[in-house]
Image (tube, rainbow, N blue to C red):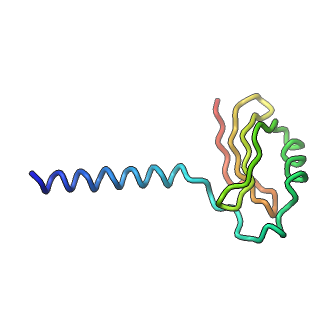
């Protein structure tokens, strides 16, 4: 009986750790911030792509991240490489 509880506990912990890592932000760049596009320039690029920015921030994974809306008014969360400006990860709510 105790062995079953230990196994169930280990499985539950594994599932929690897997879920937490899936929710973690991606790693976009390990380049020093001196090599990054300036934040104002990146905001302008994102706006030129058709996004409306609600929140713009820097993540621990070396990304520029926005929360906002696309040109279809869908809510988005997007991670950008701060050196190239490329999209690394994007989540869209319909």
Residue at 9% from the left image edge and 51% from the top image edge: 1
Nearer-the-camera pick, 67 or 88:
67
How many labels were placed on the picture?
A: 0
Residue that lies at the very extreme toward the left in this rendered image: 1
Answer above or below: position of 42 versus 29. Answer: above
Answer above or below: position of 14 versus 93. Answer: below
Nearer-the-camera pick, 80 or 40:
40
Of the 4 image quadrants, the one containing the C terminus is: top right
Nearer-the-camera pick, 65 or 84:
65
The x and y percentages for residue 37 are 86, 60
Residue at 62% from the left image edge and 57% from the top image edge: 26
Q: Is residue 41 left or right of residue 19?
A: right
Nearer-the-camera pick, 94 or 61:
61
The x and y percentages for residue 58 are 73, 54
Q: Quadrant of residue 63?
A: bottom right
Answer above or below: position of 57 versus 28. Answer: above
The x and y percentages for residue 48 are 89, 43
Residue at 75% from the left image edge and 71% from the top image edge: 31
Q: Is residue 16 left or right of residue 82?
A: left
Residue at 75% from the left image edge and 54% from the top image edge: 64
The x and y percentages for residue 7 are 21, 55
Q: Is residue 5 left or right of residue 86?
A: left
Q: Quadrant of residue 51?
A: top right
């Amino acid at each position: 009986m105790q062995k079953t509880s230990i196994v169930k506990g280990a499985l539950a912990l594994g599932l929690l750790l897997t879920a937490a890592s899936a929710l973690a932000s991606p790693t976009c760049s390990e380049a020093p911030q001196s090599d990054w596009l300036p934040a104002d320039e990146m905001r302008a690029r994102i706006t030129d792509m058709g996004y409306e920015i609600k929140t713009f921030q820097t993540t621990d994974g070396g990304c520029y991240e926005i929360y906002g809306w696309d040109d279809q008014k869908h809510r988005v969360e997007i991670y950008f490489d701060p050196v190239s400006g490329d999209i690394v990860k994007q989540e869209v709510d319909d």
